Image (cartoon, rainbow, N blue to C red):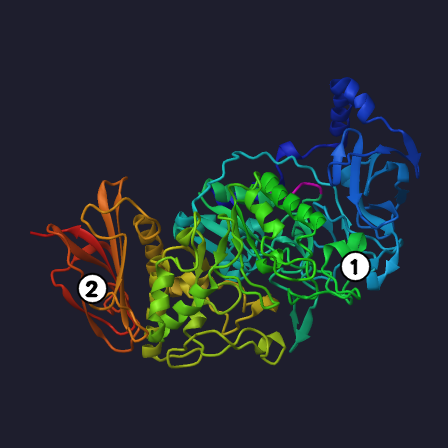
């Protein structure tokens, strides 16, 4: 596929989507004729307000939606006493019309109005709600305050990255057209045990000039990298937040450098894609460039998982702005103390009140929207433990939101992945209310394997448990390798290169005197802090990186890798790059060529995992009689792994019905700083071990595409090295 040509066509706009006003009006007229009597009753004005013909709207559909002859607007508030719709000409700050929604147009707590004669391409809108103002009770109504529709599908004022966002005039929304034609509605539905997740930041992935993309920092730029992603072998991209967020919130300057909320965890609108991530101005088309990107990824077998932030919003605490939820129902959407202050289990100023029935409904409806309209394959929930707290912040035994998401029919096939902790101290790895449906970022895997890899050999017993699926944490119908998302690095922390280049964080550029970011990194600089020309240190660092990807790809569970780790991307020791929209955070694609050998090894380990299903799942018993999983020390007959164990062996085995052969893999890792001796497990007659991986090989044979026959049962394993063997027919 010619991806550059695809991107160019995308940005020009397809002919099917370029409609002139007259043609649309003709279609509306024809619609009136075609739908007959129903149209005569449903879409005939009943009143006139502010010069517009209006009638009651569609109460069952939230947000603003185009209908024959006009637009229907619906918004609900439990405590507001009145609601007005404000209409603006594009890019104007003062409304050209304010339409009070009559009380007779309200059913229950829902105001809904259809306004006729509106052309969606010619206006923007927001609301003004009146009601009691009593901060101690959490009521913040202000009839003069512009309120962004919580269901806004597109937000105005966010187009230019890094520029100040709407202030006292508030945000406006646009009505969008859902007229994207999907060439295919198929979802890959890759099983968790078959998935290899690649976490990336849309802007940072292609923003560096070394990416050599035509449209850097955008969805279109990511499209240009799809051939690369496919060649790497990953099965899913996990996109850091792409909902409309405010990157200038909490921004500051340090040493003349403008620092932004680069990561995107300050959500402004949960239904709207970030317009600054689109290379083209889309106006009233619903996320066209994003949808094109998703479709092309799916055509190449790559799923799209979104990192979603339902634990807090950009409105912050009592000192933060009023954008949407505060002005609609502050005391419903946020967890508040008895005196109206904000609980802060997110560490970001406020906490979304997820288990209130109204907020539950909002979240469920939002996720359904992204699945049905954008064909999203899964969601990773930031600080997901908050989703299990009640309105007072107490952990719930049976959280209704988590159960509802697990049982929702529209979400039945999407991946639900929890970051099973929060900033309030709740740590639920292995204890998250999963309902046999949720998977988890396995933070315990990250911590112990980091320790084990660098030589804290007293962690061997737990390390073996983590590598073999963390079955001590995950039990039940959706247990073990289907629940554990294994990772060593992610956006929050060191890159893999930096994990073996720095003993300590180096976050001085963030402007907080190096006090931000985690101090618990379990990293090792291999003998020199940061950049070095010492060949021995550089060789050791690369071996440690090879060990890391070997262990990760040979662990049961779903592996997740951080973008750029595959060719040694660095953040120069910064383990909290949330504010670094620059060379610190951007992927440095020139390292791909510099570290080509390591990249090829990384790709080979991904391919090896895919070629050997015994690593990732239970299979029918192996015909050769070997057990499904066996663990040992350097002696295959010694299964007593203790804190003093320096060398561990892990064997997977099963019968592959597709190939009609036994599939057997044997991993040996020496975490010690001296070489060791190992004995290979005995095999049935006719079989032998073939070596595939030796990360300690200094002669360029660290990965063999064809296993090399091993004639001896006693071998030497190098210091801090991994060996991987597979079953082959014995040579005569």
Q: Where is mark 1, residue-wise?
A: 322
The spot of residue 176 in percent (x, y) is 71, 40
- Quarter occupied by residue 46: top right
Q: Up-down: is 473 above or below 45?
A: below
What residue is drawn where x is 25% and y is 46%?
A: 621
Q: Up-down: is 309 above or below 498?
A: above
Can residue 583 be seen in the rendering of this structure?
yes
Q: Up-down: is 332 above or below 544?
A: above
Q: Quadrant of the N terminus?
A: top left
Q: Is residue 360 left or right of residue 674?
A: right
**Magenta-drawn segment:** 284-288
Check if residue 84 falls in the magenta segment.
Answer: no
Can residue 225 be seen in the rendering of this structure?
no
For mark 1, does the 10 Å Cα neighbourhood hold few (<14), some (14 to 19), or many (20 or more) residues? Answer: many
Q: Secondary structure at mark 2?
A: loop
Q: Nearer the viewer, residue 410 or 125?
A: 410
For mark 2, does the 10 Å Cα neighbourhood hold few (<14), some (14 to 19), or many (20 or more) residues? Answer: some
Pointer 1 or 2: first along the chain: 1
Q: Where is mark 2, residue-wise?
A: 636
């Amino acid at each position: 596929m010619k991806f550059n040509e695809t991107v160019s066509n995308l940005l020009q706009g397809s002919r099917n989507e370029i409609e002139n006003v007259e043609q649309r009006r003709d279609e509306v007229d024809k619609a009136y004729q075609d739908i007959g009597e129903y149209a005569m009753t449903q879409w005939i004005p009943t009143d006139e307000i502010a010069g517009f013909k209006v009638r009651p709207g569609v109460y069952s559909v939230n947000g603003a939606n185009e209908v024959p002859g006009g637009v229907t607007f619906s918004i609900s508030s439990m405590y507001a006493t009145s609601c007005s719709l404000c209409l603006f000409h594009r890019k104007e700050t003062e409304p050209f019309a304010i339409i009070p929604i009559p009380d007779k147009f309200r059913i229950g707590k829902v105001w809904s109005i259809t306004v006729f004669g509106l052309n969606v391409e010619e206006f923007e809108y927001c609301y003004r709600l009146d009601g009691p103002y009593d901060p101690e009770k959490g009521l913040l109504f202000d009839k003069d305050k512009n309120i962004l529709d919580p269901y806004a599908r597109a937000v105005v004022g966010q187009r230019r990255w890094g520029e100040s966002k709407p202030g006292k005039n508030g945000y406006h929304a646009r009505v969008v057209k859902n007229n994207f034609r999907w060439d295919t509605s198929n979802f890959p539905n890759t099983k968790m045990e078959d998935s290899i997740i690649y976490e990336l930041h849309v802007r940072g992935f292609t923003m560096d000039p070394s990416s050599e993309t035509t449209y850097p920092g955008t969805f279109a730029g990511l499209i240009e990298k799809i051939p690369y992603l496919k060649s790497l072998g990953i099965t899913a991209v996990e996109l850091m937040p792409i909902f409309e967020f405010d990157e200038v919130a909490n921004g500051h300057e340090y040493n003349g450098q403008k620092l932004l909320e680069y990561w995107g965890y300050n959500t402004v609108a949960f239904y709207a894609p970030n317009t600054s991530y689109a290379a083209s101005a889309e106006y009233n088309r619903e996320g066209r460039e994003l949808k094109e990107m998703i479709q092309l990824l799916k055509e190449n077998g790559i799923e799209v998982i979104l990192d979603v932030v339902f634990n807090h919003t950009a409105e912050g605490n009592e000192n933060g702005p009023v954008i949407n939820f505060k002005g609609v129902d502050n005391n419903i959407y946020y967890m508040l103390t008895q005196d109206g202050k904000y609980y802060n289990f997110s560490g970001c100023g406020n906490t979304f009140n997820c288990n209130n029935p109204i907020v539950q409904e909002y979240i469920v409806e939002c996720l359904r929207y992204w699945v049905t309209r954008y064909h999203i394959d899964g969601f990773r929930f930031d600080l997901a433990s908050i989703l299990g707290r009640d309105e007072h912040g107490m952990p719930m035994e049976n959280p209704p939101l988590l159960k509802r998401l697990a049982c929702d029919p529209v979400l039945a096939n999407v991946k639900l992945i929890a970051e099973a902790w929060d900033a309030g101290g709740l740590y639920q790895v292995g204890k998250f209310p999963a309902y046999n449906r949720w998977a988890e970022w396995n933070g315990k895997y990250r911590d112990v394997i980091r320790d084990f890899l660098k030589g804290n050999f007293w962690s061997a017993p737990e390390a073996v448990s983590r590598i073999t699926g963390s079955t001590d944490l995950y039990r039940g119908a959706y247990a073990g390798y289907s629940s554990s998302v294994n990772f060593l690095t992610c956006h929050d922390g060191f890159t893999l290169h930096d994990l073996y280049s720095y003993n300590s964080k180096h976050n001085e550029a963030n402007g907080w005197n190096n006090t931000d970011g985690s101090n618990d990194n379990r990293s090792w600089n291999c003998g020199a802090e940061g950049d070095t020309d010492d060949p021995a240190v550089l060789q050791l660092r690369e071996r440690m990186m090879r060990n890391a990807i070997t262990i990760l790809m040979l662990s049961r569970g779903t592996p997740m890798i951080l973008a750029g780790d595959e060719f040694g991307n660095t953040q120069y020791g910064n383990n909290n790059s949330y504010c670094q929209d620059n060379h610190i955070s951007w992927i440095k694609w020139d390292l791909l060529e510099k570290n080509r050998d390591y990249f090829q090894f990384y790709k080979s380990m991904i391919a090896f995992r895919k070629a050997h299903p015994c690593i990732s799942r239970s299979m029918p018993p192996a015909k050769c009689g070997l057990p499904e999983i066996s663990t040992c020390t350097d002696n295959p007959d010694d299964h007593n792994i203790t804190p003093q164990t320096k060398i561990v062996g892990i064997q997977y085995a099963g019968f592959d019905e597709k190939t009609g052969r036994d599939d057997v893999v044997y991993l040996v890792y020496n975490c010690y700083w001296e070489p060791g001796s190992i004995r290979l497990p005995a095999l049935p007659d006719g079989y032998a071990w073939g070596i595939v991986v030796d990360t300690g090989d200094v002669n360029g044979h660290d990965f063999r595409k064809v296993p090399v026959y091993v004639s001896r049962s006693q071998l030497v394993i190098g210091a801090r090295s991994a060996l991987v063997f597979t079953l082959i027919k014995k040579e005569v």
